């Protein structure tokens, strides 16, 4: 799914070794699925009961990290990625934490999407831009729906 989505974007070079990449990615995916990274969740994005993509998110006390979202080509440009990101923004706002992500420098379409959704450039590495979104109006003044925390006592 990841290779198909990336290939459709024209982002795999002529020297791309698919067999080698699949071997490393398979081992890494098994690690994720077997919950060896307990803060990280890898999910299948479904649309109408059909597998549309993959979503990977890490949640910690300090924030939410969108580690990756890949949609198959036939599901791209239909608002699905936007809906997923908007849901994560709602979760981040409710927890009053930032939503962070890295977008590869060779993926300008994704960067435009995230910037349109309110993400700001906060840094970069050799391979990616680091972007962050934080709720402009924290929900801390509203009672928390859970019982027992300090915010629920307001």
Image: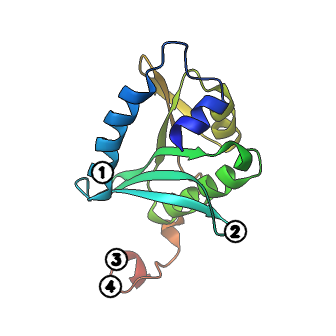
Q: In this figure, which residue is indicated by the disc labeled 4?
A: 148
Instruction: Using residue 115 as the reference point, say whether residue 34 is left or right of it.
Output: left
**Mark whose residue sits in front, 4 or 1:** 1
Q: Position of residue 45 (x, y in %)?
A: 57, 59
Q: Is residue 18 visible?
A: yes
Determine whether the residue tagged by mark 1 lies in a helix, strand or loop: helix
Q: Position of residue 98 (x, y in %)?
A: 46, 49
Q: CA distance from mark 2 to mark 1?
A: 26 Å
Q: In this figure, which residue is indicated by the disc labeled 3?
A: 150
Q: Residue at x 59, y 23 (%)?
A: 11
Query: Mark 1 Cα within 10 Å, few/some/many (few <14, many 20+)?
Result: few
**Mark whose residue sits in front, 2 or 3:** 2
Q: In this figure, which residue is indicated by the disc labeled 2?
A: 48
Q: CA distance from mark 4 to mark 1?
A: 36 Å
Quadrant for the N terminus in the image: top right
Q: Earlier in the sequence, mark 4 or mark 1?
A: 1
Q: Earlier in the sequence, mark 2 or mark 1?
A: 1
Q: Foreground residue, 122 or 140?
A: 122
Q: In this figure, which residue is indicated by the disc labeled 1?
A: 30
Is the C-beta separation of discs 3 and 1 under 8 Å?
A: no
Q: Earlier in the sequence, mark 2 or mark 4?
A: 2
Q: Foreground residue, 125 or 26?
A: 26
* Residue found at the far front of this picture: 19
Q: Position of residue 33 (x, y in %)?
A: 32, 57
Determine whether the residue tagged by mark 2 lies in a helix, strand or loop: loop
- The image shows residue 27, relative to residue 61, as above or below, that is above
Determine whether the residue tagged by mark 4 lies in a helix, strand or loop: loop
- The image shows residue 50, relative to residue 144, as above or below, that is above
Q: CA distance from mark 2 to mark 3?
A: 39 Å
Quadrant for the C terminus in the image: bottom left
Q: Residue at x 39, y 35 (%)?
A: 22
């Amino acid at each position: 799914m990841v290779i198909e989505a990336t290939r459709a974007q024209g982002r795999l070079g002529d020297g791309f070794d698919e067999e080698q990449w699949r071997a490393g990615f398979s081992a890494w995916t098994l690690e994720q699925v077997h919950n060896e990274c307990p803060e990280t969740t890898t999910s299948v994005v479904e649309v109408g009961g059909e597998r549309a993509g993959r979503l990977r998110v890490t949640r910690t006390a300090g924030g939410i990290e969108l580690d990756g979202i890949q949609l198959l080509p036939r599901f791209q440009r239909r608002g699905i990625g936007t809906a997923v990101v908007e849901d994560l923004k709602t979760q981040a706002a409710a927890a009053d934490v930032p939503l962070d992500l890295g977008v590869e420098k060779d993926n300008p379409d994704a960067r435009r999407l995230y910037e349109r959704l309110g993400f700001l450039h906060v840094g970069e590495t050799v391979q990616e831009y680091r972007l962050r979104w934080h709720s402009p109006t924290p929900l801390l003044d509203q009672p928390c729906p859970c019982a027992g925390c300090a915010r629920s006592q307001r």
